Amino acid sequence: MRIDTLPVRLVVVSVFALLVVNRARADTLFVSDYGQGVSGAGAISVIANQVVSTFASGLTEPTGIAFDSSGNLYVGCETVVNGFLQPAIDKITSNKTVTVFASDLTDHVEDIAFDKSGNLYAATSNASALQGGGAIDKITPSGGKSIFVTLPPTSIVGDVGLTGLAFDGQGNLFAADFKTIYKITPSGSASTFVTLPNVNQFNDADIVGLAFDKAGNLYADAGNVIEQISPAGAIRQFAAVNIEDNAFGNAFDSAGYLFVGLGPASAVDDILPDGSGVSVWANIPNGPRYIADPSVSLPVPEPAGVTILLAGTITFLSRRRSQSKKEML
């Protein structure tokens, strides 16, 4: 579906990236709200016309989210099985019915992504071990589970292991682990695609979100920096959010704007298609993580895991975020 956009009108630019933007679109985003890691405090939030509401609540540590071709939402989380918390993937229907789709996974689930055949892939890692690596589990539409590939520990102190996942147009799966992004073929053969350098002394966080644009460039959230990586592996800084923020999941809309979840800032930012401006799209309490788009239910050119429906004109003024967390009703 073609979406025409009005020209972007830049009114104010300052060191705090204050922007007034006129866009012919209104995005509906689904965002996992981590709930500060408190059992049952997590949720899936919906942002429609920059108004935040709750789609599902009572979740424990929701992380990666993705839609299947039927419009069902899947979320990596922890769930109670036989009286114990276990890594799991919940399935949430459009009428908000929640069931456990898969449990007894290899380890804690971070991001998830669907391939073109409807198989779901889950990046799992033992974050408490802080040694990196981990397994990517594969779950068939019928619920059959297997380990698709196991990536080695990095032995880097503080490495929490596998995080973001994204498919390219050829069916290759890309997986992030600390500063390394792996490329995994459909047959499960893994190789190092790129290793990102530290941009500055503050940018020492793991790569988290991964997303492809329509040209096949890969975007990686690392600390407060979003890097653009060409299909050939050339790296350049695309944009940066406030230095105290930490970018998590990301996703493109069909107009080429990149949305980024910022856990510490309790906000979702959007970034102009050329990376020249960053502004607050909405505030979400308790730690927004990953974003998902039901209008792009299968991989690439948009990323698995964010929902964006477009229409209308929105004018807004971004503001510098504080670290306080205010719940939006």
Image (spheres, rainbow, N blue to C red):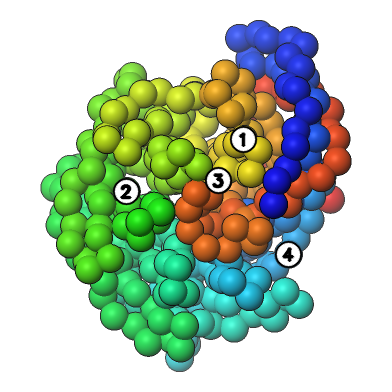
In the picture, the disc for residue 37 is: none
- Check disc 4 and report its element: helix, strand or loop: strand
Is label 3 or label 2 in front? 3
Is label 1 or label 2 in front? 1
Closer to the chain start, of discs 3 and 1, is 3
Q: Which amino acid does label 4 sit on?
A: Phe
Closer to the chain start, of discs 1 and 4, is 4
Instruction: Return the x and y of residue 29 as percentages of the image width and height.
Output: 68, 51
Q: Mark 1 points at which residue?
A: 257
Instruction: Return the x and y of residue 128 as percentages of the image width and height.
Output: 29, 58
* Viewer-closest of 114 and 145: 114
Q: Which amino acid does label 1 sit on?
A: Tyr
Q: Mark 3 points at which residue?
A: 251
Instruction: Return the x and y of residue 295 as percentages of the image width and height.
Output: 66, 59
Q: Mark 2 points at which residue?
A: 176
**Residue at mark 3 to residue at mark 1: CA–CA distance:** 8 Å
Q: Mark 4 points at which residue?
A: 55
Closer to the chain start, of discs 2 and 4, is 4
Quadrant position of residue 273? top right
Quadrant position of residue 24? top right
**Residue at mark 4 to residue at mark 3: CA–CA distance:** 19 Å
- Check disc 1 and report its element: helix, strand or loop: loop
**Residue at mark 1 to residue at mark 2: CA–CA distance:** 22 Å
- Residue drawn at (68%, 67%) of the image: 57
| 12 to 169, vertically: above or below | above
Q: Which amino acid does label 2 sit on?
A: Ala
- Check disc 2 and report its element: helix, strand or loop: strand
